[in-house]
Amino acid sequence: MIPIDPKTCKNFIDEISIYESDVEKLVTYFIVRYLDKGLEFHNIVLRSKILFEISLDNIKELYLRLEAVPEKIRTTARNDLNFILFVRNRQMICDKQIKDLLINPEYKLCIEDILFHLEYTVKLIEGGKPFLGQPNNKKISSSQLEHLQESFDVVVEYIIKNSLPFSYKTPLKSKFQNICDQFFLLTSYLKSFRDLLEEHSYRSYIPYLLDDYWILNRNPEYWAKMEKYRDLNDIYQEEIDKTLDEEVDLMQNVGALKIHGDNEVVRIDFAKASEFAVAMQIHQNYKKLIDIYGDPDTEFTYRDRNYSVNDLLCLIKAVYAYITEQNEDKRNIKSAFLCLMGRKALLRAIGLDNAKEGNLLDLLSYDLNNDVNKHYLVHDKVLLKSDNLFFILPSRINEIAIERMLDKILTNQVAVNFKRENKSEQKGFVFEDNLENFFKSMGLKFGRVPQNKNRGVPEIDGMFVFDNYVFIYEAKASILPNSAIDTYNFLKDTLLKAREQIDCRMFLILENPDAKAYIEQKSGIDIENLNLAPFILLNHRKFSGYKELKSSFSDFYFPVVCFDDLKTILAQRIVPVWNYNKDKDMYARSVNPLNTGEELWNFMLNQFENLETMEEPIVHLNDLGVGYQIVRPTIIDDTTPTKFQRKTPGG
């Protein structure tokens, strides 16, 4: 996944718009630009997604005319054009098959039939029976389940496109099992093809044809290793973030724990175990948003009424607790569960019929009537609705990332009322304040630099001294990107901007004595005799270790670092190291000591080198004609105590 400036793609689209109706001129324009800019132009073509829109005949004509360009460029471009033709052809076939399936006059499918069978299928896979009789492999079944849920936006899209009717009844059994199976299979294929094109446009992988299969190699080559190191640290972080005090408080809040006297008698209500698990899940998820929105008492306005984030959390907790409770009563694999409820009945069922939080129910729901052209939104909503009828699908609570749902609501559907010294503030200032408080608490010399337009000096989010290095960072707080499109959008919109900002600041320090003097004065840090270490600091690990954000004036890249990792290193003076144990199929954690500025800077530049061994990748050759690496579940061996190593990272 390599970024290209969005302005470059827009300029390209504007340039070719005048050739839309003239194939000859369009193809000639492409060839001229290929001859001039080579693969640089080819990457712009891919990123613009124009090849997903123009006719297949135009692509074939371009393929033939590429004979005029140098061999290296021709080979790469033709390989990509072949792959795009392959995927788009199969997309068209899938689309026709789905439409034929849904409009077949021999049977009359209702929306409820499809949603019921989706839950039935999820339970089959969870019960160890793979979808459509695929090989009974636990890891493959896990991947199937994930993909089935990821394809839900396509399911909803075709339900709406084909105007499937409501029956307004909950089915008692799956009436059209074979039809629904085929529908889910085809929608999952179509989702796969769309994702293939999307990720190919971002250069997330390089496809090559091997016999009859297109094999997808990750790009950059180190991405899989970077991803595994990131996931290991994420999983470990989630566990250590669960403090005993937090668990006790939450157990008391839901009534699962009662303490009498001076901690003399403790009573645990095991019937409240599910409610406590839900409360803990939501609490852990919101902790990921504190750097963006602050504490749960942050207020927002919705439909001319004021609420707190905590009101929204209470509603989510009530909905999740109700669905979890109902789902646990229906563990029999033959009892797929779909529930249809009116607004008032649902609010009574979750215990919020007289609470103001009930007014926020629409924020958790995908509207089948009004969100018809925004099918992607269904992945951020736990409920479906039509007018005042709500559809409850238990599988949704496992697919929805709560922190992502909250972020989408607070960003797009309500007006958040940030408060900071009696002034309104934008997202991100909370994160910057938290950073400053941490670095100062560590006893590190810290400074921030305000903007000075007269001197041409932009704001510097923060800089701190560690040993003989001054670390200068650009801070960005956001929700963890999830899908391929969200990941690339974060890269091109947020990280490219951060690269430009830190690049500008470094240029001023190195080349502008007046600006450097101002920065030293305002930060209180004498830069002259210190090594410079510029980096981008995030509140999540999605791009930790990424090496493609290059400086414009030197042969150098700006490392991307997660604040949680930096906190661990500076507070404990250690670097986490991971090794794979093939016999256990687990990863064991150890640590290396870190004491110097050079060691910290080396970690930032080479983070995933601390993943010393990892499992062999599993390449799955599917019946779509594509081979790709399966992302296997990451399991940590918690029986192995963390130990110190004396080896340096990467050697």
Image (spheres, rainbow, N blue to C red):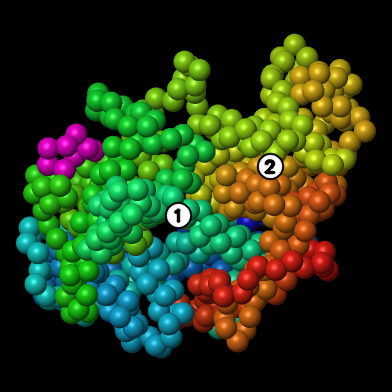
Q: Residue at x 32, y 84 (%)?
A: 129
Q: Identify the amino acid type marked 1.
A: Leu
**Which residue is denoted by mark 1 in the rendering?**
244
Asked if one can make out residue 20 in the rendered structure from this viewpoint, the answer is: no
Please say whether residue 554 is visible from this viewpoint.
Answer: yes
Q: Is residue 627 magenta?
A: no
Quadrant of the frame with the C terminus: bottom right
97 relative to 302, above or below:
below
Determine which quarter of the picture holds residue 175. Answer: bottom left
Classify 223 as above or below 618.
above
- Dividing the picture into quadrants, the one containing residue 304 is top left
Question: Does residue 65 appear to the left or right of 20 in the view shown?
Answer: right
* Residue mark closest to the camera, 2 vs 1: 1
* Dot 2: element: strand
Q: Quadrant of the N terminus?
A: bottom right
Q: Residues within 10 Å of mark 2 (few under 14, many from 20)?
A: many
Helix, strand or loop at label 1? It is helix
Q: Is residue 125 left or right of residue 11?
A: left
Residue 376, horizontal then vertical, whole percent:
36, 51
Provide the residue designation for mark 2: 536
Q: How far apart are the two marked residues, 2 and 1, measured between alpha carbons?
A: 33 Å
Residue at 62% across, 84% down: 582
Amino acid, disc 2? Ile
- Residue occupying the point 50% across, 64% down: 196
Q: Which residues are magenta?
A: 352-360
x then y, percent, for residue 271 = 22, 63
Mark sitting on residue 544: none
Residue 257 position, x and y percent, is 29, 55
**Is 509 situated left or right of 115 in this image?**
right
Instruction: Give above or below for 422 relative to 184.
Output: above
